[in-house]
Amino acid sequence: MSVVILVLVATASIAVGAKGLSVEQVWHGLFQDTGTYGDVVVADRLSRTVLGLLAGAALGLSGAVLQALTRNPLADPGLLGINAGASAAVVTAITFFGVTSLSGYVWFAFLGAAAVGALVWFLGGSRGATPVRLALAGTAISAALYGYLQAVMITDDQALNKMRFWTVGSLSSANNSTILQVLPFLAAGSLLALALARPLNAMEMGDDTAKALGANLNRTRALAMLSATVLCGAATAACGPIVFVGLMVPHIVRSFTGPDLRWILPYATILSPVLLLGSDVVGRLVARPAELQVGIVTAIIGGPVFIFLVRRRRTAQL
Amino acid sequence: MRTNRAIRTPGGLSLRLDVRATVVVGLILLAALTASVVLIGTGDFPIPAGDVLKTLLGNGNAGQEFIINELRLPRVLVGLLVGASLGLGGALFQAISRNPLGSPDVLGLSQGATAGALTMIVLFSGSATQVTLGALVGGLVTGFAIYLLAWKQGVHGYRLVLVGIGVSAIVTAVNGYLLTRSTLTDAAQAVVWMTGSLSGRDWTQVWPLLWLCAVLVPLVLANARGLRMMEMGDDVSNALGVRVERVRLLLLVAAVLLTAAATAAAGPVSFVALTAPQLARRLTRSPGPNLVPSLCMGATLLVTADWVSQKVFGADQLPVGVVTGVLGGVYLLWLLVTERKAGRI
């Protein structure tokens, strides 16, 4: 069911835009080259759709892993400072290294996210890391970095001008080279995350029970942190910080799968891109021929859905 | 040393006094006053601390009197009041949501106030007063919306935080949209406001804040007993005779008002509401919401941060919010390292 929805949304994402295409044209563009104008449009929108799929899956997975790791329903990549790290690195790239192209940001953003992830892990106590310590370290580093970010934006108008567009999160800059840049990281991170479902499940029952069940706490935490950082860092590098997907989708999924991560993680992988691409399509529809950035739409659509879910039922506890 | 002492009056009234907490509050207040005096003396025309005190007591010369009473004193007072409101508001939110991260920034109040202010700046090119009003309205509407949306036969802490996050995400997106649609000049003005700044604050901002605090702080403290019971859970506190929902509504409204007013006056100064209660709790080492210590700590933090920003970056180069963010972050890191060495977390 979820896969069908995903395919539909992906098709819509290719078909919808400033110039609408029929489903037939999309089919031709994808599988039988007819050499028409439609094919060019399809090729262009295809990279955008692929990036949306990848980034959506990565954000959902990393959110689910982080919520399990920190045992905190509020955990999202932002809490561990990953967004702040990426943003600070991008603003540094703009102001001090004169980088202006979006594809130039990617490495900076990824490095920033990875550096902050490692720092949080180290300050959080590395081998003895507990959920509270990790969250505290992430919040602390975020705060310090946002202070720096704001200081730069206040003094440098050029950086402000670039950053105000980058920080809302958008898929419009997608091209094949960006996708290739982040693809290996996304693939490795996803595999790692999915493989961690079992030990993370054990950890949900509390540290002592998990130990008794034979889980290696330190190793699981380190790997979970690594996969979440890599996934979210790569996604953020490619499209800017899109905050809400990683937070919300695991909650939605949990409301129908229950707390078993072996179900939550795959569902999050499939449903997060639905949310992200769906939002992107809506963003292109409501503001035609211009578009509303996907980060804005995810929040405006996702926010009320999220509140509705929180209200409607007892959200399954972690 | 015994940490608790009971004071009994002949009439049969008694008061339990936490000695350590009382001493800590005294020291924090002293720190706040010292920082204020130093801050008043700091600026393009430095004034020694002795002269500042003399002028405040009414014996200064005319020039210093003008600089202090008209320019710097209101700014410092706004700083103290905003810090105190944020500290108390933060402590209330953290106690009500039972989450140490349940600060106004996380619950979306700061973002709501920002949305109000941004609307005024970007869409109406509003004056400073209009921006303040916009922020106040934005904060109050957001707070009200969060409470209504979280209401379902009472407000549960967990639901409050989750709904707050949802609202916060929506409002943040609106803010991002407003920023991308504004001219660069407006955006620059908006970013300064969004960082939180004390520069150019005068008596017209002091009085409303002062009145609000004068009404709300006693009201909150009078209801703090109930809050302390509520930390044990709603059922237990019901059994102990606390009208949980009423106390919660009252305190929540107070917290929203305090935070919205503080944000309207100085912008969403980051981190004070989050750290002040945590700092206070660690200094007093006493359980419970620690309302008074948090209040004093918030005031001290903000005034000290303003002084640091003037010292390090020069007068009014960077707004105080930059410093609270960086200082707060560095402090939390230090805390993390020391607590880890002490084996407490």
Image (spheres, coloured by chain):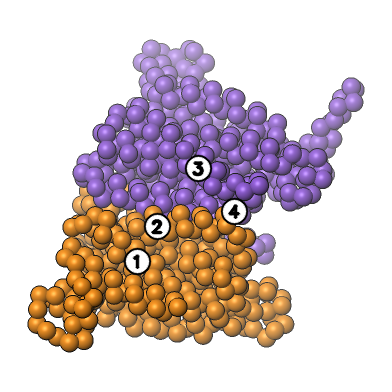
Chain colours: A orange, B purple
Q: Is residue B247 above or below residue A294?
A: above
Q: Chain of mark 3?
A: B
Disc 2 residue type?
Ile
Secondary structure category for the residue under label 2: helix
**Mark closer to the chain start, 4 or 3:** 3
Residue that mark 4 sits on: B159
Q: Is residue A32 above or below residue A62?
A: below
Residue that mark 1 sits on: A278
**Label 1 – label 3 distance at C-alpha:** 27 Å
**Label 2 – label 4 distance at C-alpha:** 19 Å
Residues under numbered marks 1 and 4 in contact, where contact means CB atoms less than 8 Å apart: no
Are marks 2 and 3 in one subunit? no
**Label 2 – label 3 distance at C-alpha:** 17 Å
Q: How many marks?
A: 4
Residue that mark 3 sits on: B145
In the picture, which quadrant includes the N terminus of chain A? Answer: bottom left
Secondary structure category for the residue under label 4: helix
Identify the residue at image location x=82%, y=43%.
Answer: B240
Identify the residue at image location x=28%, y=47%.
Answer: B179
Identify the residue at image location x=52%, y=16%.
Answer: B57
Left or right of A102, for residue A266: right
Q: Is residue B338 visible?
A: no
Disc 3 residue type?
Ala
Residue that mark 2 sits on: A301
Mark 2 or 4: the one toward you: 2
Residues under numbered marks 2 and 1 in contact, where contact means CB atoms less than 8 Å apart: yes
Q: Nearer the viewer, residue B36 or A304?
A: A304
Identify the residue at image location x=54%, y=55%.
Answer: B162
